[in-house]
Amino acid sequence: MRLLLDTHVVLWWVMDDDKLTDDVKTRLDAEPGVFVSAASLWEISLKQQAGKLTGPPDLPERILAGGLTALSITPAHGIAAGRLPPIHRDPFDRVLVAQAVVEEMTLVTRDRRVQQYDVALLPV
């Protein structure tokens, strides 16, 4: 199974946060196909720049070095995100949903609005 991590899950994973159960942490560490979207890295960088997220200045690079596979944003992802029903207004979350749908991945998230889309989910 290929997993795409929502931004908050990426942060919880890299920080070894207790919000992720040991079962989910083990799964993320063991699955061969665990992806982080360029959208999540962009969102993390923006939040750091705005002072809404603390951590080392090179946090996005550390996330990439942590073993997750990077997923670029393609034109197909952009088109699919634009065509999603307006359940969620956050463009980062819309891109993640579109990527999961287009790439046939399972989206790992706690976001209840994201969970309303027709996308394969692993709720945390």
Image: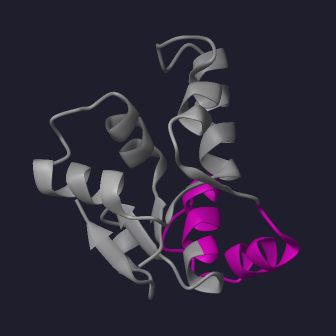
- Indicate whether 22 appears above or below 27: above
Q: Position of residue 18 (x, y in %)?
A: 15, 35
Judged left or right of residue 59, residue 111 is left
Quadrant for the N terminus in the image: bottom left
- Indicate whether 78 appears above or below 23: below
Decide whether the magenta segment is chiefly helix, strand or loop.
helix
Residue located at (40% from left, 43% from top): 8
Q: Position of residue 63 (x, y in %)?
A: 54, 34
Judged left or right of residue 80, residue 7 is left
Of residue 31 and residue 92, the one placed in the foreground of this image is 31
Total numbered labels placed on residues in the image: 0
Per the image, is 92 magenta?
yes
User: Which residues fall within the magenta stretch?
Assistant: 73-99
Residue 64 lies in quadrant: top right
- Indicate whether 55 appears above or below 37: above
Q: Say if residue 47 shows up in the picture.
A: no
Quadrant for the C terminus in the image: bottom left
Scheme of colours in the image:
one colour
Of residue 33 and residue 7, the one placed in the foreground of this image is 33
Residue located at (34% from left, 40% from top): 13
Furthest residue to the right? 75
Q: Say if residue 6 shows up in the picture.
A: yes
- Indicate whether 46 appears above or below 86: above
Residue located at (76% from left, 59% from top): 72
Q: Position of residue 93 (x, y in %)?
A: 54, 59
Judged left or right of residue 107, residue 58 is right
Per the image, is 22 magenta?
no
Q: Position of residue 47 (x, y in %)?
A: 58, 26
